[in-house]
Amino acid sequence: MTDLQMRPDPAAGVHASRADARHGGTDAPALRVRSPWPSRWRALLKHVGLIALALVMLYPLIWLLVSSFKPSELIFRDVSLVPSEIDTTNYTAGWNALQYPFSRYLLNSALIVLGSLVGNLVSCSMAAYAFARLQFRGRQLWFAIMLMSIMLPFHVIIVPQYVLFSRLEWINTFLPLIVPKLLATDAFFIFLMVQFFRGIPKELDEAARLDGCGHGRIYLQIMLPLSMPALATTAIFTFIWTWNDFFSQLIFLTRPDMYTAPVALRTFIDATGQSSWGPMFAMSIVSLLPVFLAFLLGQKYLVKGIATTGIK
Amino acid sequence: MSVVSEFRRTTGRRGAAGAARGVTGRGEGKVAAVFLAPWFLGLFLITVGPMVMSLYLSFTEYRLLKPPTWIGLENYTRMFEDPRLLNSLKVTFTYVLTAVPLQLIVALGLAMLLDRGLRGLSFYRSVFYLPSLLGGSVAVAILWRQVFGAEGLVNAFLALFGVQGKGWVSDPDTALWTLVALHVWTFGAPMIIFLAGLRQIPEMYYEAASIDGAGKVRQFRSITIPLLTPIIFFNLVLQVIGAFQSFTQAFVVSGGTGGPADSTMFYTLYLYQKGFTALQMGYASAMAWLLVLIVAAMTALNFLASKYWVFYGDD
């Protein structure tokens, strides 16, 4: 703090607001010649602007939430955000509006997420260990191929995959959605973990090797425990992406009892008319809730994960 | 740092370094094979195998129930006479070329505002990031249908000013722009990447510049932008690749049709209709390969153009 105050303030507007924020305005620095007021006002203006923007951004989501507690016929007539009464009939109606209760679809989604989580965590960390720590012929080449596979459009393989999986009679099972994850096809996470593993001091595994540890134990007992942040980032992104995934679930799951939450949600549009906006909104909220919770719990890892690897 | 810079690095200095390591390697090939076994299996069974297969299918007439019959380049020539396909290309390019730059500009602008030790930074960051996480979901696409519907939120807002709105989603002239708006709404993820990039610019550059009398605008133009170009480039490459493959939003907002009047018929949506509704798997495979070529060409173009505007401090 003192250090900061002693430093000559570059005064130009760019840094003024930062200095202000740190000083907290309590001890008006005698050293400062310029009055802090203009930048203070500017900061205030900025906050007003940002909060306004935040509200605009969140307004549709809040409206969705509020509308889900309103009777359908009121949703469009009354745009206010304060419902006159809280009405949960949309939720009970939506839960039972489709062929199966919505819990069925949520469970299907959850099972796929679970399989994908296990798959990505195990297979991607194994591959990452090889790329980060093992010497083998063609490592650079394989690594480049791995990076390229990240950018490959998924659609180019979907048709033959469909043919392959239908030959195996895997359509309308969760296998087409889980088995690829067990085989590390989400190469983004390999990359993320390679980055993380590289940051772990090599001395640690070299010491372990001198003590007679094999690679299996180094991977299990040194690398994995030290890589919790990377594993957590992988887990959270796998969770959110799999939960939100639509394209592959739409293609591989065509029987209503195998529908996942997004696929089921989509059938609301076909199956129902204007009258059932309410139940559809309610189930939209239900299906967004797990992602929202993952966001709340895992924010730190999400932000770090994006900042270092650029995943969305 | 990022996939793109890593890719530059890896492909750039293969050869000497790679070969040397191969020779001096401690013979860990067998262990590596074990650790890489799942990935190898996936690469060949789930990725490369189907790629080869789809290349073959793209030269055949294949309707799933009968075995494929070889028709040579016919699928490819048919594509260029298919007005709906050409239209879907136009729709997709319009979308990519507007949504991606708009989103990146908003993301960069917000990142600039949020940098500089702003109080409440993590709060704003979270709020702006949330739509990125939800934006790809069916639920939000359903919501979007309502927000821009005839009786939706946007029109309710316009009505406050006495403006009579219209059904934005059901009008062929505006439907695509609602999807562009949805993409811009999810600017949070690139914003966070920009924030991380801004943080890496040494403070002393700005201090030196302001001592030399450079104003804010000048600093932005001469320090921030040049030093940020690798990150802008990285975002651009990834967003373009991603945007070409957008599917869910168009599918849900148009109810699976790509309508009204094919105005939201994304390329992927048409591919889906051809492959999985009409079951013309050969044609769909050819479409998929055209998509790969387009995405590869756009990425290559990005990389080529980057020589002229991306500034790498280490070069």
Image: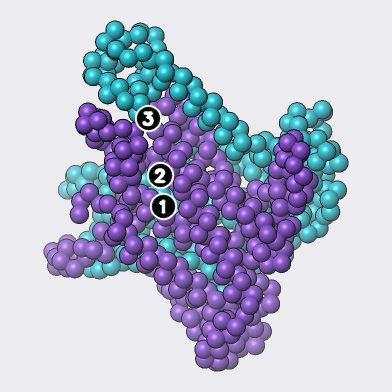
> Eyeballing the image, is A49 above or below A37?
below
Chain drawn purple, letter? Answer: B
Residue picked out by circle 1 = B235
Q: Residues within 10 Å of mark 2 (few under 14, many from 20)?
A: many
State the residue at coordinates (49%, 54%). Answer: B100
State the residue at coordinates (41%, 70%). Answer: B297
State the residue at coordinates (72%, 63%). Answer: B260
State the residue at coordinates (66%, 40%). Answer: A60
Residue A259 location, quadrant:
bottom right
Q: Label 1 vs label 2: CA separation?
A: 8 Å
Q: Which amino acid, mark 2?
A: Ile
Which one is earlier in the sequence, the residue at label 3 or at label 2? 3
Q: Helix, strand or loop at disc 2?
A: helix
- Left or right, A68 with reference to A48: right
User: Which labelled disc corresponds to residue B116?
Assistant: 3
Q: Label 3 vs label 1: CA separation?
A: 21 Å
> Eyeballing the image, is A214 above or below A77?
below
User: Which labelled disc corresponds to residue B193?
Assistant: 2
Q: Nearer the viewer, mark 3 or mark 2?
A: 3
